[in-house]
Image: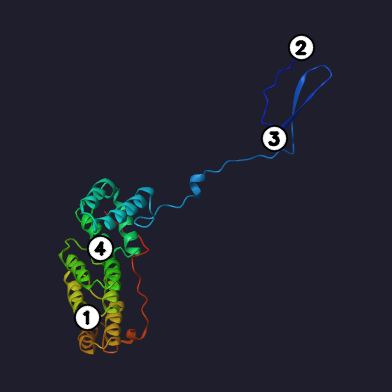
Amino acid sequence: MSRAIATPTPPSACFFSVSSSASLRFKLNPKAMVITMRDRSKNRKPLQKGRNLSIEAIQAVQALKRANRNAYNNSFSDLDRVFDSKFRRLLKFDMIAVLRELLRQNECFLALKVFDDIRKEVWYKPQVMLYADMIAVFASNGLLKETELLYSYLKTESSLDPDIMGFNALFNALISFKLTHLVLDCYDFMKAVGCEPDRSSFRILINGLESIGETGFSAILRRDAQKSYGESLDFLEGEEEVKTGYFISIPIN
């Protein structure tokens, strides 16, 4: 007795029957459902630098906070060990993510220590927007001495890009917390690094200073604005929406 041997196909696509002659026959099921697999990697959103926390970054944040709390009771040696074992081994984007997470949690002193470490990295490139974010967080926590320290860091940075959005965010932060003595200094510093104020800059500065009663300083800036944009200064009437870098990526080359 002869037998016909067929290679079976998946059950969803076929069925079989056994004839009286004991031959095994397979027939295609015309109603079979065909399933195709999609590349799941296409569903994944790209990671955003300095924003999403990796597992390593989360562990570093937790370890740093724990060691920092214990440092007040013991010594700072535990905190230094955590920096060596957890933080300094991170990738550069994870380091920035750790810094931003500490800022988000208002862990200012720990964030400052992390920032000091980041500034020593060979890949570090100063960003005005990052300074604006840090100064806003520190000032909102009443740490004015540390706020001025951060501003002094900014002024010592070399190869600083003329980032107009970053400076505008910084102006807004300084005015919001009435750090008037830093506002005009920052205005001069901005021009010294080759970043000329635009209409948004003058709108933030003039309207902001006048809102806190600093009409003398605003008059100086009005004269500068008139030299660049004429006597009318109609653009001062508009409202300015200042973007910060707290929820955007920080490019590091």
- Pick the quarter of the image with the N terminus: top right
Q: Which sits earlier in the primary sequence, circle 2 or circle 4? A: 2
Provide the secondary structure element on which disc 4 rests: helix
Q: Amino acid at mark 1?
A: Thr
Height in image: 245 above or below 66?
A: below
First in sequence: mark 3 vs mark 1 = 3
The 10 Å Cα crowd at callout 4, few under 14, some 14 to 19, many 20 or more, is: some
Asked if the residue under mark 1 is in contact with the one under mark 2, i.e. CB atoms within 8 Å, the reply is no
Quick check: marks 3 and 4 in contact, CB under 8 Å?
no
Instruction: Characterize the local packing of mark 1: few (<14), some (14-19) or many (20 or more) Cα atoms within 10 angstroms.
Output: some
Which numbered mark, 2 or 1, is in the foreground of this view? 1
The kind of residue on which mark 2 rests is Ser
For label 2, the residue is: 2
Q: Nearer the viewer, mark 3 or mark 4?
A: 4
Are the residues flagged by discs 3 and 2 in contact, CB closer than 8 Å? Answer: no
The disc, 3 or 4, on the residue closer to the chain's N-terminal end is: 3
Tell me the kind of residue under disc 3.
Ser
Residue that appears at 30% across and 73% down: 140
Crowd around label 2: few <14 · some 14–19 · many ≥20 (10 Å): few
Distance from the alpha carbon under mark 3 to that under mark 2: 28 Å
Residue extending farthest to the front is 73
Q: Earlier in the sequence, mark 3 or mark 2?
A: 2
Q: Nearer the viewer, mark 2 or mark 4?
A: 4
Scheme of image coloration: rainbow
Q: What residue is disc 1 on?
A: 180
Residue under circle 4? 109
Depth check, front residue: 30 or 239: 239
Of badges 4 and 1, nearer the viewer stands 4
Which residue in the structure is indicated by mark 3?
12
Q: CA distance from mark 2 to mark 1?
A: 100 Å
Q: Quadrant of residue 27?
A: top right
